[in-house]
Amino acid sequence: MPFSVTSFGLLNNSRWSVQPAAHRSVSLPDQGVDGLQTNFYVNKLLDFAAVKKGTSVPCQVCEGKEGGARSWCVQCAVLLCESCTNTHRRFPDMRRHQIVAQLLQKNEECVAGSFQRKVFCSKHEDQVLTFYCEPCQTLVCVSCAVVDHRQDNEHNLVEIGDVAERKKLDLQDLLKKVDHRTRESQAALNDFEKDISELTTSTDATIEQATVCSDHLITLLQDRKKEIVNDIELGRQEVMKYLETQKEAIEFELAGLTSASEFCTQALEHGSDVNVIVVEGQARQRVEELLTTPTDLQTPPSQVVFSEGTAVADNVKVTLDDPLGQPVPTRLQEKNKGLGSHGIIRVYYSREGTLLKTLNSDCFRDLRGVRVLKDDCMLVVDKKLKCCLLLQPDGSLIRDIGKGQLQNPRFVAVDESRDLFYVTDGDAHKVLVFDLEGKMKFKFGEVGLGERQFLCPSGITLDPTGNVIVVNFLGGRLQVFGPDGTYLRTVPRESQRQQMVT
């Protein structure tokens, strides 16, 4: 029956150690535990460890009758006691054998390398294993070779040395494969450790960026909340002042009408004919004055209602050149006014706003920024397609630019003198620069509130020297960069300029 065997190393010193072997299942042979293969390597280590620690190891000649082993015959591969060593040296044929004495004083590595124990046949205990039967794939002694493995078609005996050499080559090949796989595994392990480290670093950086962006959005919302509440409060005060004024005017008018009514009533009820004639003129003049005084009885709404809405871009202005090269103010508008979000562009090419032409194409979906080039071609930003579209004057597509590189393109500025155009990307928090052939040249900016940093950049334009001016949607900052993306300065707000003057 199969059972689990785990082999553990028995030696662990400053020079070498035996590591645990892998778990594997072993089936017991018919002979039981005694039939399991002998681990010659472990036996050799046990002998050497015992000698090294000073433990008495029996002599392998007299079997410990004369004393413990003190020497080792390299040629005979046996441990000898002192008496057997002296006897061993008296034989003429053994005088040239190499005897390793004083084992504890020898170099451990050298002694261990020359320490070879004789291996005896399990069937003939006094016989040393000498041959290897290839068909049977087993080691045999001389007796086994004569009795059980006689040379014939079924048995082929080979000297152990020849077989060992072949096996050594096989082991070397296996070792090469193991070494190669070990290097691959180590390289893979290094890659995984690097990926884990990079994942941790990038995750921390992304969390930090998200936290900065979220905190800034929260701050903006809190500021906007204050502005809305203040606006509502100011509106309430203004309306309240107006209502109070109107109320006072109406109360004054009502008091006059009541007084006139009482005056007329008294004259009718208690006045004589003379009194009626006298007061009728006075009453008529007073009532006519009250009735002819204009009164605004329509009051403004007395309820305040908050309506949540979305900000929309208003008119987008561009400049076209006339045939003489002079700039002509024009206007492209959103939706039914001009620049449409569903594939319609209306171009106004005169100071009076006369409609020149309408471009309706299936090649664009959700248009944002637009620029008209000197050759009347147009460069438009399509948010839904996440790219820029270079169009012929008739609206037909020349090429799309930036697909797979733009995430949320917003607006575009063109520098035809350098054959470049600049696109703001609100989600990437960057400005990407392409040539008109569609190749991305470089990009600049990163998420944040500092210099050379953006939070949802939107508007972009160029000054006469080619510097790039970028509007930051969140935070309301306006930054100036060189044509190559080099940060130059941040334009201060009005409040900041006042503080500087102060």
Image: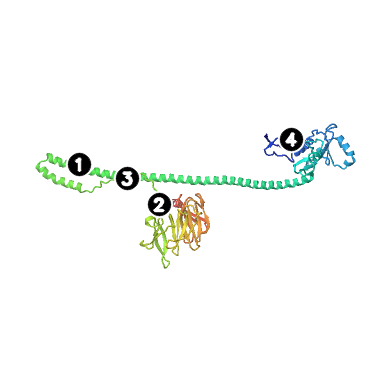
Tag of residue 35: 4
* SS state under label 1: helix
Q: Position of residue 452 (x, y in %)?
A: 51, 53
Marks 3 and 4: which is nearer the front? Answer: 4
Marks 3 and 2: which is nearer the front? Answer: 2
Mark with earlier residue (3, 1): 3
Label 1–label 2 contact, CB within 8 A = no
Residue shown at 87% from the left, 43% from the top: 96
Asked if residue 237 shows in the view, the reply is yes
Q: Which residue is mark 2?
A: 312
The residues bearing labels 3 and 1 have C-alpha atoms spaced at a distance of: 28 Å
Q: Position of residue 183 (x, y in %)?
A: 67, 47
For badge 4, the amino acid type reads: Gly
Left or right: residue 75 versus residue 283 is right
Left or right: residue 126 versus residue 186 is right
Residue shown at 21% from the left, 43% from the top: 256
For badge 2, the amino acid type reads: Val
* SS state under label 4: helix
Mark with earlier residue (1, 2): 1
Left or right: residue 501 versus residue 15 is left
Tag of residue 258: 1
Q: Which residue is mark 3?
A: 239
Mark with earlier residue (3, 2): 3
Mark with earlier residue (1, 4): 4
Label total for image: 4
The quadrant the N terminus occupies is: top right
| Residue occupying the far bottom of the picture | 324
